Amino acid sequence: MTSPYAFFQYWLNVEDASVLTLLKVFTDRTADEVAELGRQLAEEPWRRAAQRTLAADVTTLVHGAAATEAVQAASEALFGKGDVRGLDGPTLRDAAAELPGGEVHVGMSVVDALVAVGLAESRNAARRTIGEGGASVNGAKVADDEAVLVADDVLAGGVVLLRRGRKNLAAGRVERPEGV
């Protein structure tokens, strides 16, 4: 089975040429609503209003309204428009599974974490990224190249979100000891 997050992302990434047809087939939107979404698509394709509507409608149909709200919140948080700390564990874990990443642990330096998740090719490159102000942990900029991951950095689901620049995001997966 596909997680609600992956399902939502699939529909969100539908190409412009197909989205109106898919809206007609898979949703209960009226012809006028689909026409309006088509107009928005033609005038402002970067907003992806038709794809967002399709993704929300179909995800709600299959997984329910609560799951749709959770994945929309996760999408916004991952892409810089929300708070990742407010996400529930299963949703965050599903979202992180769609990201590149690797194993990290509490006490690991942020420099080593950036290398471990593939956001930097070397420790020197990771230090440069931090020095240039281009690294963040869970949305908070890292200014010190001596910074380490602490227990508070581990989000629900055992995930630490690391970012290089504006668009490069990866998930550090933390193995929790049993009983914790």
Image (cartoon, grey):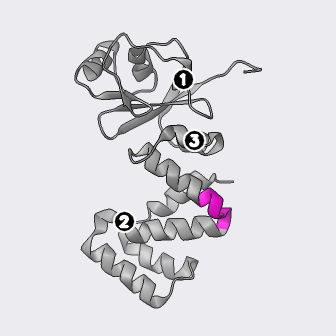
Dot 2, how many residues are within 10 Å of its Cα: few (below 14), some (14-19), or many (20+)?
some
Q: Nearer the viewer, residue 89 or 129?
A: 89
Q: Nearer the viewer, residue 78 or 11?
A: 78
Dot 1, how many residues are within 10 Å of its Cα: few (below 14), some (14-19), or many (20+)?
few
Residue marked by disc 1: 152
Task: Tell me residue 110's x, y (percent).
Answer: 41, 18
Q: Is residue 33 above or below residue 118?
A: below
Quarter of the picture holding the C terminus: top right
Q: Which residues are magenta?
A: 62-68
Mark 1 or 2, closer to the camera:
1
Task: Tell me residue 178's x, y (percent).
Answer: 75, 20
- How many numbered tags mark residues here? 3
Q: Amino acid at mark 3?
A: Leu
Tell me, for residue 38, which label it has, or none: none
First in sequence: mark 1 vs mark 2:
2
Quarter of the picture holding the N terminus: bottom right
Tell me, for residue 48, which label it has, or none: 2
Q: Is residue 50 left or right of residue 84?
A: left
Q: Which SS does the magenta portion mostly show?
A: helix
Residue placed farthest to the bottom in the image? 31
The part of the image, by quadrant, that contains residue 143 is: top left
**What's the residue at 36%, 10% (across, down)?**
146
SS at circle 3? helix
Tell me, for residue 92, which label it has, or none: 3
Q: Amino acid at mark 1?
A: Asp
Task: Tell me the distance, in whole angstroms, between the alpha carbons under discs 2 and 3.
Answer: 23 Å
